[in-house]
Image (spheres, rainbow, N blue to C red):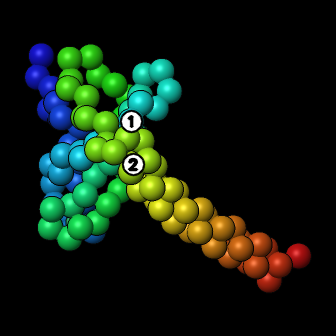
Amino acid sequence: MNDHNPLYADACEHCMTRDVLPESSLPDGADGIVAGYRCPNCRHTWTCSWAVVPGRAIPPEPIGGAERLGTLLDRYVTAQLHEQAAVNRARKHLSKEGPA
Ligand SMILES: [Zn+2]
């Protein structure tokens, strides 16, 4: 059986670099990992959650322990929270302005 992505590679959404390999990962519950990426081209960082596929090599835990990926993850989650909050504010605004 062919595994098309044996190293949990992901694509950079900023510059579209493909097959960026995770720098590190942490276990995420029972059957998953959160992998941290840094784009070699534009230095964009992101995280991706994966279901662990048997036979695939798990990326190493971050150098310096969970704290490093935690920092990366926090920044990502904070950005997501800001975005979601903005969407929610826009929705509320629209429903106020919309036809009653
Ligand atoms: Zn990039």
The label shown at residue 37 is none
Residue at image x 29%, y 22%? Answer: 53
> Number of callouts in the render?
2
**What is the distance, in whole Å, between disc 2 and disc 1 at their CAs?**
8 Å
| Residue closest to the far right | 100
Ligand 1 position by quadrant:
bottom left
Residue identified by numbered label 1: 26
- The correct choice, above or below, for 18 with respect to 9 in the image is below
Give x and y (percent) for residue 95: 79, 74
- The correct choice, above or below, for 94 with respect to 63 in the image is below
Task: Work out whether residue 11 or residue 99 is closer to the camera in this orientation and state it.
Answer: 11
Relative to residue 30, is residue 45 drawn left or right? left
| Residue closest to the far left | 2
Residue at image x 39%, y 36%? Answer: 26
Examine the image and state in which quarter residue 31 appears.
Answer: top left
Asked if the beta carbon under badge 2 is closer than 8 A to the nearest atom of ligand 1, the reply is: no
Residue identified by numbered label 2: 69
- The correct choice, above or below, for 90 with respect to 46 in the image is below
Task: Work out whether residue 51 or residue 21 is closer to the camera in this orientation and state it.
Answer: 21
The N terminus lies in quadrant: top left
- Residue 35 can be seen in this image: no
- Residue 67 can be seen in this image: yes
Examine the image and state in which quarter residue 6 appears.
Answer: top left
The C terminus lies in quadrant: bottom right
Examine the image and state in which quarter residue 45 appears.
Answer: bottom left
Relative to residue 97, is residue 57 drawn left or right? left
Mark 2 touches mark 1? (CB < 8 Å): yes
